[in-house]
């Protein structure tokens, strides 16, 4: 039975800090911003807008002196996530530059069986800014993984996107509903969500 008013988040109940970090104090982690999400079978609703927002966020992070880490999902040769092929490459607008490491993963949680935690521990920083694809999958599970490891993740909503799916009962779940559900799940416990990159102070 639903109530007319929303419940308090778990973060509020247990007293976690919901303030977004200063970009200069954070590590920007760009998750799976690969060409596969802009074309073909894995194309996402709003992918182009999200890439543009992520590119602007990346430029700000670089200007602010923030550490930047890229993540790419490798599904193997012939898959939509083949990092050796154009379809699986990180999009040009948000591609790494010298000094920015790329973590290759095989699971939705970017920390699982990768060197991401080690790279972050080496900096001594616990504030993370997350953006990328897909919101309900690798962004959400990376935020959860970060939270479980003691990091403080903040997701930039405009720099994420997902796709329409079929629910177990056969109904259609629009991408907008899935996007909202994933971001709401994150804000309930795993981290903070800001609507736009501009909501992060430098």
Image: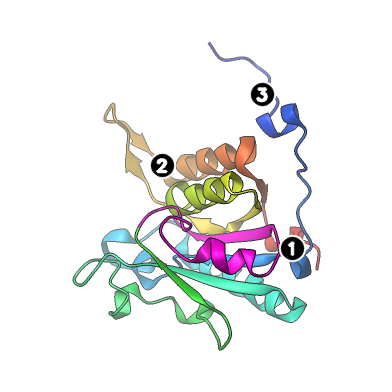
**Of the numbered discs in the image, which one, if any, rests on residue 198?**
1
The residue sitting at 78% across, 42% down in the picture is 17
Residue identified by numbered label 3: 6
Magenta segment, which residues? 107-134
The residue sitting at 50% across, 48% down in the picture is 140
- Mark 2 and mark 3 residues within 8 Å of each other at the beta carbon: no
Residue identified by numbered label 2: 174
On whether residue 109 falls in the magenta region, the answer is yes
Which of the marked residues, 2 or 3, is nearer the chain's N terminus?
A: 3
Which of the marked residues, 1 or 3, is nearer the chain's N terminus?
A: 3
The residue sitting at 66% across, 29% down in the picture is 10
The location of residue 8, given as percent across then percent down, is: 70, 25
Q: Is residue 50 at least partly visible in the picture?
A: no
Q: Residues within 10 Å of mark 1 (few under 14, many from 20)?
A: few
Q: Secondary structure at mark 3?
A: loop
Which of the marked residues, 1 or 2, is nearer the chain's N terminus?
A: 2
Mark 1 to mark 2 CA distance (whole Å): 27 Å
Task: Tell which tag, 2 or 3, sits nearer the viewer.
Answer: 3
On whether residue 66 falls in the magenta region, the answer is no
16 vs 54, left or right, is: right
Q: Secondary structure at mark 1?
A: helix
Task: Tell which tag, 1 or 2, sits nearer the viewer.
Answer: 1
Q: Quadrant of residue 184?
A: top right
> Closest to the observer: 144 or 50?
144
Mark 1 to mark 3 CA distance (whole Å): 27 Å
Q: Residues within 10 Å of mark 2 (few under 14, many from 20)?
A: some
Height in image: 62 above or below 8?
below
């Amino acid at each position: 039975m639903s109530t007319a008013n929303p419940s308090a988040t778990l973060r509020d109940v247990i007293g976690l800090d919901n303030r977004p970090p200063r970009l200069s104090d954070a590590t920007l982690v760009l998750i799976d911003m690969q060409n596969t999400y802009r074309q073909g079978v894995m194309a996402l609703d709003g992918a182009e807008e999200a890439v543009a927002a992520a590119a602007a966020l990346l430029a700000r992070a670089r200007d602010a002196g923030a550490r930047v880490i890229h993540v790419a999902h490798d599904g193997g040769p012939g898959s939509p996530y083949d990092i050796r092929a154009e379809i699986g490459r990180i999009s040009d607008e948000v591609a790494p530059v010298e000094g920015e490491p790329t973590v290759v993963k095989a699971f939705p949680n970017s920390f699982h069986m990768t060197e991401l935690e080690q790279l972050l521990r080496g900096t001594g920083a616990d504030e993370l800014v997350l953006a990328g694809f897909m919101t309900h999958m690798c962004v959400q599970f990376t935020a959860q993984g970060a939270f479980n490891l003691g990091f403080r993740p903040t997701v930039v909503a405009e720099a994420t996107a997902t796709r329409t799916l079929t629910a177990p009962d056969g109904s259609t779940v629009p991408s907008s509903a899935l996007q909202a559900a994933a971001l709401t799940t994150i804000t309930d416990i795993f981290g903070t969500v800001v609507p736009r990159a501009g909501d992060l102070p430098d």
